[in-house]
Image (cartoon, rainbow, N blue to C red):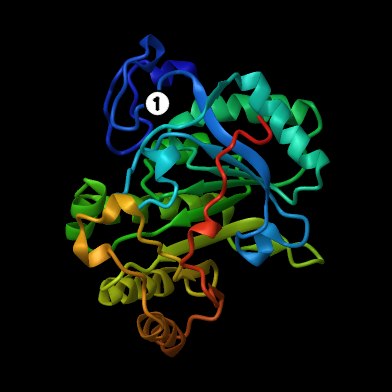
Amino acid sequence: MYELLKCCTLCPRECKVNRLANEIGFCKATKDIVISRAALHYFEEPCISASSGSGTIFFSNCNLGCVYCQNYQISTCGYGKKITVERLGKIMIELQNKKAHNINLVTPTHYVPQIIEAIKIAKNLGLKIPIVYNTSGYESVETIKLLDGYIDIYLTDFKYYDNNYSKKYSKIDNYFECASIALEKMYDQIGNPIFDKQGIMQKGIIVRHLILPGLIDDSKKIIKYLYNKYGNNIYISIMNQYTPLENVKKYKELNRIVTSKEYDEVINYAISIGVENAYIQEGETQKESFIPSFNFEGL
């Protein structure tokens, strides 16, 4: 499995660097796992966080690198602490012991070989709760195939319909194609959602879409695409929590929050075309206080 790091093509950027020799590509990850936080998290979708929280593990670095990322400190700047595969497996057990409903792997793509080995270690130590793959959606089919049998829930973004936006804000011109094909493979693996008696997801797919200021038409196209293809067999999480941070100041159009009018327009559109299985956000979600503290908790 680690041989995949010798000529890294884990994501669609296909940098082909030798990470075993500590060469770095776009994501800046080497052979070492780097994480910034491992703790119970209560602000995911209700079927993920529920009452006891989701056992989130925040991985540093990112293969997508959106200019507006709320986790910019770790995703783009790479802030974090190196840990071993063995330690990652034990962290999963520690989160289970804290009554986490699941293990939530946040921005995991560039560490898939190491994560698979850590899951094996954790399962040998008694890990039983579902494993959530929390991704930007910019995935290769081959990497999703590797995860078959290890992942129970895909919590995946679907950021852009128009690749002009993905090129401008994420430096890629093939986001829609890659995200849509990867989602098909995820659905082939997981199928329709399964919940326990408490309404906590045990298996399934949640597709997140973060609305960006001014891109309402793009949001509608994404929701229409998802509903036409998957109906109510997946859950769509329509998010208004976009927060303009310091790093987006040069993008004037992004230097504001999404208005209530914009958000309501997208929600009403989703309802009008028949979307039923959806999560929406209420209240003042566009606050930096919703961004976790990356303080090495749980490492």
Report the residue that reaches farthest toward the top: 21
Q: Residue at position x 33%, y 29% from top?
A: 9
**Is residue 11 depicted above or below 248 in this figure?**
above
Give residue 186's position: percent from left, percent from top.
49, 51
Q: Residue at position x 66%, y 66% from top?
A: 46
Q: Residue at position x 39%, y 59% from top?
A: 158
Q: Quarter-wise, where is residue 197 in the image?
A: bottom right
Say few, some or many: other residues with alpha carbon within 10 Å of mark 1 (under 14 / 14 to 19 / 20 or more).
Answer: many
Give residue 81's position: percent from left, percent from top.
54, 25
Which of the two residues, 252 or 190, is positioned nearer the viewer here?
Answer: 252
Give residue 51's position: percent from left, percent from top.
77, 61
**Is residue 21 depicted above or below 143 in this figure?**
above
What residue is shown with label 1? 29
Please give the count of numbered marks on the rendered protein.
1
Q: Quadrant location of the C terminus?
A: top right
Q: Quarter-wise, where is residue 48 in the image?
A: bottom right
Give residue 293's position: percent from left, percent from top.
57, 45
Look at label 1 and name its amino acid: Ala
Tag 1, which secondary structure? loop
* Side (left or right) of 25 relative to 207: left
Which of the two residues, 193 or 245, is positioned nearer the viewer here?
Answer: 245
Q: Residue at position x 81%, y 43% from top?
A: 98
* Side (left or right) of 232 relative to 67: right
Which of the two residues, 204 or 278, is positioned nearer the viewer here?
Answer: 278
